[in-house]
Image (cartoon, coloured by chain):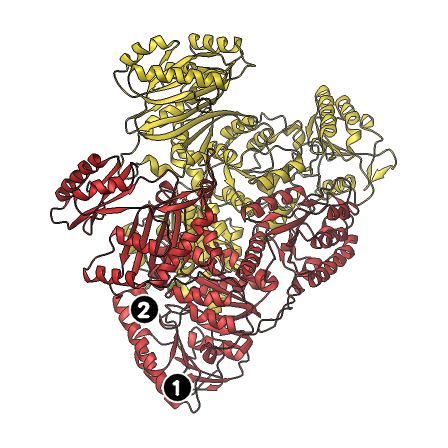
Chain colours: A yellow, B red
Amino acid sequence: MTQTTATSVQTSEAQPKVVRKSPLHDFLAPESIAIVGASADPTKRGYKAMVGLIKGHYAGRIYPINPKVPEILGVPTFPSLDDIPGPVDLALICTPAATLPGLMAECGRKGVKGAVILAAGFRETGPEGAKLEQQILDAARAGGVRIIGPNTSGMFNLHQRVNLLDLSNVKAGDIGFISQSGNMLLSLVLEAEHNGHVGFSTYVGPGNQTDIGFNDYLRYLGEDPNTRVATLYVEGFRDGQRFLQAAREITPVKPVVVYKSGATELGKKAASSHTGALAGSYAMTVDLLKQVGVSVVHHSDEILPVAEGLALMQKANGKRVAVIADGGGQATITSDRLSEAGLELAELSEATRKRLASILFAQASLANPVDVAGTSDANPEVLSQCMEIVAEDDSVDAVFLVGMFGGYHTRFAESLLGGEMRAAEAMIELAKRIDKPLLIYSLYAPVKPPALRRLHEAGVPVYASIEYAVKVLQALGERGLYLRNQHGRPLQEGVAPSEDMQAMFARANNEGRDLYEFEAKTLLRTHGIAVAEERIAHHADELGEIAAAFGGLPLAMKVVSRDILHKSDAGGVKLNLVGEAALRTAYDQIMTSCRAYDANADIRGVLVTPMAKKGTEIIVGVVRDPIFGPVLMFGLGGIFVEILEDVAFRAIPLSREDARGMVEQIKGRKILDGVRGEPPVDREALVDLLLKVSGIVSAYPQLSELDLNPVIAYPDGYAVVDARIITNRSVL
Amino acid sequence: MTQTTATSVQTSEAQPKVVRKSPLHDFLAPESIAIVGASADPTKRGYKAMVGLIKGHYAGRIYPINPKVPEILGVPTFPSLDDIPGPVDLALICTPAATLPGLMAECGRKGVKGAVILAAGFRETGPEGAKLEQQILDAARAGGVRIIGPNTSGMFNLHQRVNLLDLSNVKAGDIGFISQSGNMLLSLVLEAEHNGHVGFSTYVGPGNQTDIGFNDYLRYLGEDPNTRVATLYVEGFRDGQRFLQAAREITPVKPVVVYKSGATELGKKAASSHTGALAGSYAMTVDLLKQVGVSVVHHSDEILPVAEGLALMQKANGKRVAVIADGGGQATITSDRLSEAGLELAELSEATRKRLASILFAQASLANPVDVAGTSDANPEVLSQCMEIVAEDDSVDAVFLVGMFGGYHTRFAESLLGGEMRAAEAMIELAKRIDKPLLIYSLYAPVKPPALRRLHEAGVPVYASIEYAVKVLQALGERGLYLRNQHGRPLQEGVAPSEDMQAMFARANNEGRDLYEFEAKTLLRTHGIAVAEERIAHHADELGEIAAAFGGLPLAMKVVSRDILHKSDAGGVKLNLVGEAALRTAYDQIMTSCRAYDANADIRGVLVTPMAKKGTEIIVGVVRDPIFGPVLMFGLGGIFVEILEDVAFRAIPLSREDARGMVEQIKGRKILDGVRGEPPVDREALVDLLLKVSGIVSAYPQLSELDLNPVIAYPDGYAVVDARIITNRSVL
């Protein structure tokens, strides 16, 4: 069962050295396994697990627990865990939910390091189940036992010959897989059996993640020398912030692939009835995962090809792909898909074109995509020659052959088989020599002809779909760029909290309120953020002096009151006021309206500020997400956020590269370049603003939420016009 | 080679009767075939075509033309077409481009009905090739010969045993395929051989479409009784307007599937070097194809599953899908994909839930997606029972089983095979009895276990991908809704052109100019479109009377001149004018600015109109597309069109349903519902506007382009504020 696959020829780098720090090694590579609820009934999990271990040639000790039969599959049973003579690293528990609290205590007494709990009937079923789940967690913690599950499909570690699933025909290989769906594992295993390039290392079903979460499993896979790519099917994270931290550390040394389900409201509802996981905003989750270098796939069909592609080839240095085609149709389709994936057609050098011209028919197209236009029909070796020529061009980051390679001897003449095999060998040699990914799409891939089988065995990936091959190219290119930008990438500089501002938060907290708008702006100003100039009038009598101070500029006036959140609705905002008389009238109107709106409102006066110069409205926000912690949001004002939900998210803290990425990512970014002849806004100033806001959030845990709406962006800077800060009253 | 597949059990309707009007039947089902350039060299097309015909048991006469050898594959040759004793329906021409003009004349003399021209080297290579292409077209027309190609991959008609391609293992079946890529045919054939449900009827490569275009082939497939679904791979249409007309007629009786390449700029560039086709805007093409009931697929991998799904099941009555799952993960993924595809999870009735509860475990989820939660592990038949129960619910339009069906006996116990086979039979019976599509996704599909093989043979489709199964459901649902809306669907009422307006166009034409803005508005007003009230002042002296007429409303003033297109740039627009004095000042300023802008401008005065009330800006436009003819465009004003390209297109004429679809389709449609507490706009008034504009365009061929920008939409109607009409000077 544990046949290993050929090692990739496409990555020369040695597996990076990692220190084993994860406690999961102790029981995911166990030396002894107890099976609680072992059974002689072949339809039961307690029997199948034994079959999996015995057929898989597990080298450690197996202890079936069953008080009723003396042996199962020739292995002597024990009446209980306590009766086992030696130590037990891992316990597989096949008994129902109600038995679990007692069993956890027993595991603790026995010194079991990890327990795999198959039973469902916990949090995912409602409050009663959640209570039971907490009980088993408490019992396990008391005894020092770690829990996989409950509600897990099980686990395997094929390189250690541990297979608790009785899955046959699973090849041992490079893919570590953590999946909240057991069917998804089965699906990948069957797909890999028929079309896969690499096998699997460790699988775990994290189930309800009661104790061990995705972050722990990710660290384990990061440290596991047998895993070349960590792959996760996630319905919901429980501790997203820790997961992001783990990914930040692991993605620089090993690719991480995540498929997150619950992309839509319908999907979220279905997921929550499955694992009881709370699925957060899909768009936010995707942004944050990409921020820490994760390769996110959006369709379940993409999981295996992308994971395999990354296992085999690790990365491309960039997004410039050279395409060699033997037919115009597939060249066209490939161009469309590359473009949609954000990849580019490499601009081939003059020297490269000349070299191509010297071996191709006159009617061949030498611009990328290179269309050999029949040259290969009688000489398939010209394809490997073309691949070599473009691979040697510095402007090329990856080479993609599309068409009917492998099928020439079927389509044209049997005598072409020799040429096809020689071409395959040349491609394998090229893959070894050149540090660039080589991928092949062939419409003959389903037929598995000899040349494609040879490439496949040698670890040069062959795809039956242009679409999925391009997804692989995209993941390779994005990973390469991430690694390049990541290199030495500093996170934002820290912001030192000021004593005055700490005192201001304490005051608000004592008064049981959030920050006033002017306080929020003071905080921003203190840390170097450009806020529109403003003055507070506590009485109408101060308005004359204020009018004079702003020297005749049209002014805006807003009520200051902790009790009035929606100032416009309360009649608490007046605009375009010129001169003291206008200010006084506005003041009286605001006081009258606001008292009518809320007779008991604590009104502290009004804020007076010059009307903002015209510019481009943007919005900057911070939320503390229950799963991912503090998250920064950026978007354009108005309909872009409200109607189109065109916003970018990043977890705090972020790097300058992250902040730039936020500004580049939004669909409305053209607005920032200036429309209708307006000059472009100062993007670097916005990047600074984002970094400063992020720094403030890190420095002040008292700040819970922040909303700068709008900020007006100008060709030379920006101004924060309105600011709202919600305090975190549990932090002093 | 021509083994036929099992007929679908899922469509009870008889193949609709069609009258054979297309001239293509004469040579796409030929009784005699000449092969010009027939060869004894097995690598040559002139040999392969003979093999294809002989191995395919072609029943008609074969005439190889070759002056050098006496026979090829045992068939006597002829020195030239003229030497053939009997009539020739079809000539396959394998000789190079330069021989074609002479050969076309020869074909004409011989009375050949159709010629398949393989040679490339025409329009796609540049002006010289285009000239040669025109020569062969002229020669063919003179002789009454129709041309397939040139630059074609060839054709087959398997039900007539005509195969000019020597493709082995192609099953005769329901899919008619017209493809500008020969590799794409090969790819579908190989895919169908390994995983396909139905085979192929007629294939044609239209190549450069010099004579016969996609519209002609579509009509032929529409009339062909052996074709149940017409499928097209299109790099570029040559006569899009005729294609839309053909599709309008055929889609009500037969599904039409189109994959259009060139979705991106990179793809368009690649396509143009392949077939020399001009690829228009992808978004426009997709909108227009959907308007006429075509099922558009966006990825080449979707072509075969969608074509097969439509061939087997024709349609669903709506978009409400019931999902039966044996695992939560796949239920979640399915929900996500259904939602993204615009499909819905059917709301199951109370009675249905009760029936489900009576056969499922207590922990099963009875809401859609139905998760049997282990009930099927020991009893797979419960799955067919669930399918039957939900299929009988009136709220369900299609049933989708997802999970591991077919693999239960592998995964759990060999003894379950009997139950799986019984379940498969029950599903087949259900498919026959219920007029709703039944689809199955199984992760065991790649293994082809017995139950899935049985379903497959019986025409109940089994998929190895949730993603593609959902694309099939989407196509079925969209087709069902199209047919429902299409039923008796009237196109817009005609607009009778007015004599005055004809005279107005004639005047503009005589003066060699487009319409003035006030003329354009007069045309709109004449045909019942709401245009903002306005007056023209030819002299400043008329302004007093005009100011009085509008009774103190704030007014806008715009210059009237055929020479000033961009009025704002010329200083030709003044806003918010109140009172005669303000009007006089503005008039003088406009005259001064516009004369400074263009001293020779022919200025006819100014247009005065009340400032528009605030509302929602929309844009309505008409272009005469070089491929598709007159096309109506609708979008929201400002950034929606300019930055987001969020617009809807429909070919003129359109139906009320089409106009409603335009308004519903745009991403910014929420704006029309009213944002920030504003009332929704009057959508039906916008629909009327779109229909009236379309009617005007049909009535006045003198109108070339129209641009209403902006139109202001209100809760009770709309007003056209600015209108520009470009005249078609070639029409009097």
Residue A211 point in image, percent of width and height: 66, 26
Q: Amino acid at mark 2?
A: Gly
At mark 1, the secondary structure is loop
Query: Quick one: label 1, few (<14), some, or many (20+) residues within 10 Å?
Result: some
Q: Write the residue at 23% across / 47% down.
A: B536
At mark 2, the secondary structure is loop
Residue A329 point in image, percent of width and height: 42, 60
Residue B248 point in image, percent of width and height: 47, 65
What residue would you read off at disc 1?
A: B111
Q: Write the residue at 63% across / 59% down.
A: B461
What residue would you read off at disc 2?
A: B121
Q: Amino acid at mark 1?
A: Gly
Chain of the residue under label 2: B
Q: CA distance from mark 2 to mark 1?
A: 26 Å
Query: Quick one: label 2, few (<14), some, or many (20+) residues within 10 Å?
Result: some
B371 vs B94, nearest the viewer: B371
Q: Write the residue at 19% across / 60% down.
A: B512
Above/below status of A297 relative to A109: below
Q: Quadrant of residue A663?
A: top left
